[in-house]
Amino acid sequence: MVQDSYPMAGSLKTEAVVLRSLRYGEADRILHLYSSDHGRIAAIAKGVRKARSRFGGRLEPCSRVALVLHRGRSELLTVTGADTVAAHARLREHAAALDAAVRACDAVNRLFGDGEPHPPAYHLLCNELALLDRDPALATWANQLAFRLKLLVAAGLAPQLGSCATCGEAEHLVGFSGAAGGVVCSACEAGAFPLSEAAHAFMTAALGAPLAEAPRADVPALRQAERAISATAEHHAGVQLRSAVADAALRA
Ligand SMILES: [Zn+2]
């Protein structure tokens, strides 16, 4: 059992993924961390930008680390120890994989900012980063959307896909409503946007398949699926997700 010393003064040990790293002062960085035991936390890593920092390169974004953190009088924790659990060095050599990893971290940062632990979200993020590191070719739009769908489930925001989210009708599902929280039928589509059969099938298959086996779909279907995911996050968590892919040409 994890000893829960947070938020008391003293030190705490936790495993975390570095979501973001912001320059601070002359040589420090402020880290946004997603931890297994405490959810999202912020910590300062002092002297980390010096050439001979004792942390070396271990606190780079998208790294998975075992940390010792000190809690003093300030709101901010201080990193006093860091050991690498998974550096994900391979994904850093591939621009698309690194971009996907950064977007995955950003989605977690936005959806899970409540300071509560969500172990399924932590394990999902670790799984996604490990996949991208093992096979950088998995950094596809479909993979990123499958990750976000599973993240919505971990947040308790699974979109309803099996029947109309408004009236329960199982046929003629033609749209998606973020406000209703899922697909809607032709009688309930006011205020919804169109969701093609292909986009609906992609979302259902992506939720049912392992992350490494995200289903294929064409660009219009992926675009609709992304809109459905974003609308769900916006209506039910008040969160605006960044676009899931960088390539503007792909989205045009
Ligand atoms: Zn309906």
Image: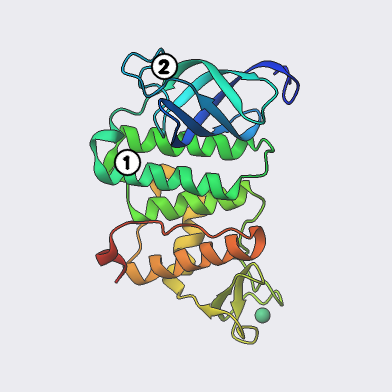
Horizontal and vertical percent for residue 250? 27, 64
Q: Does the residue labelled 2 lie within 8 Å of ligand 1?
A: no
Residue appearing at x 39%, y 42% in the figure: 101
The numbered dot on residue 98 is: 1
Quadrant, the C terminus: bottom left
Quadrant, the N terminus: top right
Residue furthest right as drawn: 8
What separation in Å lies between label 1 and label 2 (alpha carbons)? 21 Å
Q: Is mark 1 within 8 Å of ligand 1?
A: no
Residue furthest front as drawn: 26
Horizontal and vertical percent for residue 222? 39, 65
Which label sits in the foreground, 1 or 2? 2
Query: Looking at this view, is 220 or 115 the one in front?
Result: 115
Query: Looking at this view, is 163 or 5 the one in front?
Result: 5
Residue appearing at x 46%, y 15% in the figure: 83
Instruction: Give the SS element for disc 2.
Output: loop
Q: Name the residue under label 2.
A: 55
In the image, residue 154 above or below residue 196:
above
**Residue type, label 2:** Phe
Q: Which of marks 1 and 2 is nearer the N terminus?
A: 2
Report if residue 126 is visible in the image: yes
Horizontal and vertical percent for residue 122? 56, 35
In the image, residue 126 above or below residue 168:
above
Residue appearing at x 25%, y 66% in the figure: 249
- Ligand 1's quadrant: bottom right
